[in-house]
Amino acid sequence: MNPRRYGLTTLLTLAAVLLALLTASACGGGSSNSGIPTPTLAATFTPATNNPAGEAVFMDAGARSGATFTIQVKAANITDLFGVAFRVIYDPTVVEYVSSSSGSSMLTGGGVQTDFSTAEAVPGTLFVTATRIQANPFVPGVDFTVPGELISLTFRATRATAGSSFSFSTQQVEICDEVSETCAASMAPLWSGGTLTVN
């Protein structure tokens, strides 16, 4: 055997093995980093009540997916409800506001004009308006003889919590009576929030 050829073959073999080891090491490092599971959050909203006995505006649990969850703001046992305005108070270190939807609101029935608006003036305080718009001829309110949706609000949890409250503040309700064709502020109904848990 030619000793020079043997030496060259050995070097090439060693080089190939070393390259393979280096490549495997590099790939292994990448796989190790990408294999670290990303923490996921699961948010659950629990209403204080979802079947109030008297006149009420309350928060109910809507759809949820991972950290994202929807709160349905509903009314119950209120006659001729024309519109509501309120603030939702929550912990901005736990959740962030995402969006609103009026697609299932009972206020939109009959094809009347409506106004649904939200504004987060400061973190943790969401201003909400859900109302019909008065016109000629007279636009009456809606009878919420059973719980029905006013507006839905979607939030996203940003960290885990054993319990974070959602509540109402500075609430207003307007009633428009079809018979007398008059509108007035309603006597204050029950306003009920809920609690968020995030695992």
Image (tube, helix red, strand yellow):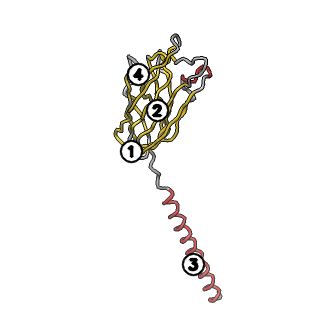
Give the foreground label among 4 and 2: 4
CA gap, disc 2 to disc 3? 65 Å
N-terminal of the pair, mark 1 or mark 2, is 2
Viewport quadrant of the C terminus: top left
**Where residue 84 sits in the image (x, y, percent)?**
47, 27
**Which residue lies under the disc numbered 3?**
14
Amino acid identity at mark 2: Ile
Q: Residues within 10 Å of mark 4 (few under 14, many from 20)?
A: many
**Where residue 152 sits in the image (x, y, percent)?**
50, 31
Can residue 67 be seen in the rendering of this structure? no
Q: Residues within 10 Å of mark 1 (few under 14, many from 20)?
A: some
Q: Is residue 130 above or below residue 27?
A: above
Q: Which mark is residue 160?
A: 1
Give the foreground label among 4 and 1: 4
**Which residue lies under the disc numbered 2?**
71
Amino acid identity at mark 4: Ala
N-terminal of the pair, mark 4 or mark 1, is 4
Amino acid identity at mark 1: Ala
Q: Secondary structure at mark 3?
A: helix
Q: Residues within 10 Å of mark 2 (few under 14, many from 20)?
A: many
Q: Are marks 4 and 2 in contact (CB under 8 Å)?
A: no
CA gap, disc 1 to disc 2? 18 Å
Position of 138 with respect to 70 (left or right) is right
N-terminal of the pair, mark 4 or mark 3, is 3
**Where residue 1 sits in the image (x, y, percent)?**
65, 86
